[in-house]
Image: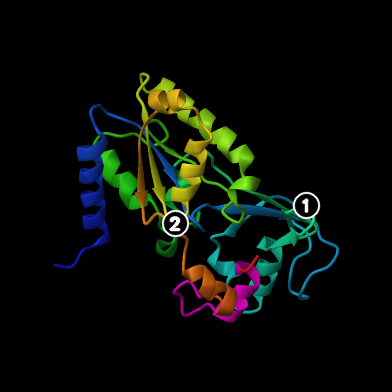
Amino acid sequence: MKITQTTLCCFLISSVVNTCYSAFHPFIFIPGDGGSQVEAKINKTNSVHYICAKTSTDYFNIWLNLELLVPVVIDCWIDNIKLRYDNVTRRTLNTDGVEIRIPGFGSTEPVEWLDPSRASSGAYFTDIVNALVKLGHVRNQTLKGAPFDFRKAPNENQDYFVKLKQLVEETYEANGKTSVILLAHSMGGPMSQYFLNLQKQSWKDKYIKCLVTLSGAWGGSVKAVKVYAIGDDLGSYMLNGKVMKLEQIT
């Protein structure tokens, strides 16, 4: 039998219900690498190509934005989203003149759809959210999203962990003091573990029902070696791995 995405979602939800539910627990979705919408605002003095805009009046969607991944234009995208690593401070920096923010913290929208236009290629947690809604859950009430800047490692996401702790506590209080299920995908698994290791056991006993991970990258990712060597085309015939490598290795 062919396992469709919907079938997989139903299996997942059934498993969560059987292993975690003793009451109607709220969910917080923690995405993986590339699993959060990203917005940028630019005010640059130079660009990598004459077609690249140097300024923007406001923040605009930079991930996932398929219009920015076409040939030539992708060079502008790479320059805007890549990181620079400071080997002295051990910190990363955006390209000069680029501000980056992660929109929609607390909402399911940015993790349901990576592309705000809701193009099918940008669908992410939406099938799982829809399955839970059918069980009686409510978006942005019993279902919350916790997107983060996936370009950065945990040591540079400390503000995110503070916000995530607050979101867990707020979700707990808003749902009749019911403990929360963290549902994480891929790199969201280690990120969730890192977050939970920061908390006292008494806090976890009170606020966290369980952590459910999908394809948690617990042992790292072999694909990371491929990315450093030749880049990754993300499974799209439109993208060139060698070109994507310029952004991915940062």
Against 227, residue 209 (above or below) is above
Q: Residue at x 79, y 69 (%)?
A: 47
Q: Residue furthest right?
A: 45
Q: Is 163 contained in the magenta span?
A: no
Against 172, residue 143 (above or below) is below
- Percent x, y for residue 231? 56, 76
Point out which mark residue 89 bears. 1
Q: Is 240 contained in the magenta span?
A: yes
Q: Residue at x 40, y 62 (%)?
A: 120
Q: Nearer the viewer, residue 183 or 110?
A: 183
What residue is disc 2 on? 118
Q: Secondary structure at mark 1?
A: loop
Q: Residue at x 44, y 74 (%)?
A: 235
Q: Secondary structure at mark 2?
A: loop
Q: Which residues are magenta?
A: 233-248
Q: Earlier in the sequence, mark 1 or mark 2?
A: 1
- Percent x, y for residue 91? 72, 53
The colour mode here is rainbow
Kind of residue at badge 1: Thr
Residue 95 occupies quadrant = bottom right
